[in-house]
Image: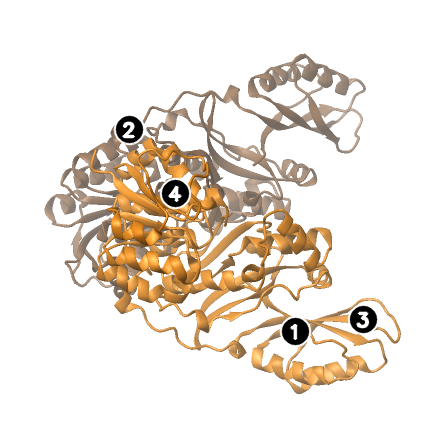
Chain colours: A brown, B orange
Amino acid sequence: MPNSLKVAVVGLGTVGAETIRVLQRNAPVIAARCGRPIEVVAVSARTPGRERGFSMEGITWYDDPVALVSGHHVDVVCELVGGEDGVAGQVVRAALGRGYHVVTANKALLAHHGAELAALAEKNGVALGWEAAVAGGIPVVKVLREGLSANQISCVYGILNGTCNYILTNMRETGRNFADVLLDAQKLGYAEADPSFDVDGVDTAHKLAILTSLAFGTRTDFGAIHVEGIRSLTAMDIAFADELGYRIKLLGIARATDRGIEQRVHPCLVRKDAPIAAVEGVFNAVVAEGQFVGRSVLEGRGAGGGPTASAVVADLMDIAAWRVGPVFGVPVADLVPLPKWSMEARKGAYYVRLMVEDLPGVFAEIAAALRDAKVSMEAVVQRGRAPGEAVPVVMILHETVEAALNDALRRIRIIAAVVEPPQVIRIESF
Amino acid sequence: MPNSLKVAVVGLGTVGAETIRVLQRNAPVIAARCGRPIEVVAVSARTPGRERGFSMEGITWYDDPVALVSGHHVDVVCELVGGEDGVAGQVVRAALGRGYHVVTANKALLAHHGAELAALAEKNGVALGWEAAVAGGIPVVKVLREGLSANQISCVYGILNGTCNYILTNMRETGRNFADVLLDAQKLGYAEADPSFDVDGVDTAHKLAILTSLAFGTRTDFGAIHVEGIRSLTAMDIAFADELGYRIKLLGIARATDRGIEQRVHPCLVRKDAPIAAVEGVFNAVVAEGQFVGRSVLEGRGAGGGPTASAVVADLMDIAAWRVGPVFGVPVADLVPLPKWSMEARKGAYYVRLMVEDLPGVFAEIAAALRDAKVSMEAVVQRGRAPGEAVPVVMILHETVEAALNDALRRIRIIAAVVEPPQVIRIESF
């Protein structure tokens, strides 16, 4: 049997500890499958001495992860600390600089510094694996980079954040509002104490930034993503969507258009019979449209120790067997800047909910505003009558350019009887 | 740029011709992604001179594929002829023997001779890629072999034959019977003139045999598979299933049990909310249950020129970049014989439809037969009343061992009022 692959694990939270448990538990089959053993020889974390469910035999402990990387000879460093900068960035840069391969689950770091780190890996002739950074256990990076590599990808989109999908699923099933469901999700450990990374769409955007780079051969450009979260969604919107044949999902979408590459994260109405609509709870799903392969769908657990460790170890096994390739699918020099694209160029249908005072003539004003903006309506639902009070009016607008929709919304906002800012949700027809 | 990978394509049917079109159309991106150009230098097919939508410049034609392999220097031979033996087997063995890599879409050949061919590839230090042999464009081989390789797989199952899935979907949507829908599918090109390979479950079993080998590290054992097709399914069964909350799908299932590894192909009732139930028409889907990753679902187009060529070219790109591994995930010497397992050991629930004369006391006889076999009933539906004529009685039986069910069926068959052999469909709860 050839030499073992020597691994350091930095960060022993849920994913780090589980990674070592997987490596220890499945050691024989892992060695058979990748042709050599994989051995953890060093670890670093903030709290020493805690029982973490794996054997420390043969493993050297470091309090300081940077000291580990500079002082211990390893083949691969697993960075499982997380965070856009700070220790994670230091560890990854130091490891790549010393000629160590790196495996990371850190989407924030890659979304902000992807091209730089890929260049550093390339310069040092080492691998930078990031399967665990997107959609947990679903091998979407491998599928896009290798499985579908014969294709030009026209579109990749998905449910990339289990917390949001859990909240939206629960809101639909219970009819409760966002704030209540979030509180429950926090109690159950499905949402962080500070949920903003998840519910404001930032985590989804991090993942989308690096998937876009891989799918389209572009330099990661987090700043180019249009990002909206799910805080403004109400139980009422979810119920109206259901009635109209839709589910509401927070999607990350990257699509090649003749005006550039769209990158956007926002709640979407998707038809109930679309494959993505059936993905519920903490599950993630990614859909890619390839030129020859057509639509491919991957679904699985997008977070948690087991699934994420499964992806980390798969990357380690690829390195052990030396099945590696360019970080974002092509050499860094071939990555092109992301062609600019503006959200105002988006073409599609829209769900618009207005709260209007129930007075005669209001609907004529709304219809005139739409007409003047050259936006046409496919359906309208008005629920209940309450003379003098605000009632919801939901409209499904035919496909239009978002700039025209914005024009219509400006006209609608100044109608006196429209008492709240319009709720607008884009409809995606996949 | 390093030397190109030189490829011969044997068989220029739908998949062979499309493979060359993909390679020619996407040549620049393919070279960028795998680090070197991939070039078709020789082809062989039965009919020369036909226009096939690709340029023959730089490509040598051979009438005899075996002469191609023995006479032309190449790096890889793509065998796209098909068939369990004959030319395909000759070409593959000759190519491996000469030290050429092989890429094939031939599930029949691998299902019958998988371990032998893997050993030949290993002995000659070459790759044998078969992504295109299972589920067309869905990279299920890559996902099982690499993406989920950190896991022990407990179960892999799927819809592996688009023809059957198209027929079952169409039967449900139109309420028509098998024979009528098959005729339409043949006219539309979704079914062969001789449909037996598809509708009798043989094609699904070929694919299952090699997926099992990969998922469980066992030697391919086609003969160990229990195979049933879809010919006996009626519009009535599909309607009853629908009413009871199920879809009927032809599944290939491999599962590790404490009594061995099940390998079976047969129609199944699956609950409508199971991910596999929503896979309709010509789409394929594969579900794997991994120890750490949990349930992973892959869905996409399982057949056709584009998707299958996408998989062939992905294998070629892996060879060009030398991202390869053992044919069935571990070295041939590590593959273990499939532990024996008998269908009588299957544990699960059952749908049983009887046609009975509508006479007093018949149901008491049926109930007694079940009781005597120690099989219990969850639900029963009887449709219509027609004194003196045969009416359907549909029972859902609680989980039991198949041996006990068979005992019950023997007792039921001899009841005089039961006028047809019972229709039995296994219920799978995933």
Frontmost of labels 3 and 1 is: 3
Identified at 60% across, 19% down, the residue is A405
Q: Are marks 4 and 3 on the same chain?
A: no
User: Label 1 is found on which chain of the structure?
Assistant: B
User: Label 2 is found on which chain of the structure?
Assistant: A
Do the residues under discs 4 and 3 have CB atoms within 8 angstroms? no
- Upstream in sequence: badge 4 or badge 2: 4
x, y percentage for residue A65? Answer: 19, 45
**Label 2: element kind:** helix
Label 3 belongs to which residue?
A: B391
Do the residues under discs 1 and 2 have CB atoms within 8 angstroms? no
Image-based side of B280 in relation to A130, left or right: right
- Gap between marks 4 and 2 measured at Cα: 23 Å
**Can residue A132 be seen in this snapshot?**
no
B233 relative to B311, above or below:
below
Label 4 belongs to which residue?
A: A134
Work out whether residue B285 or residue A348 is closer to the camera in this orientation and state it.
B285
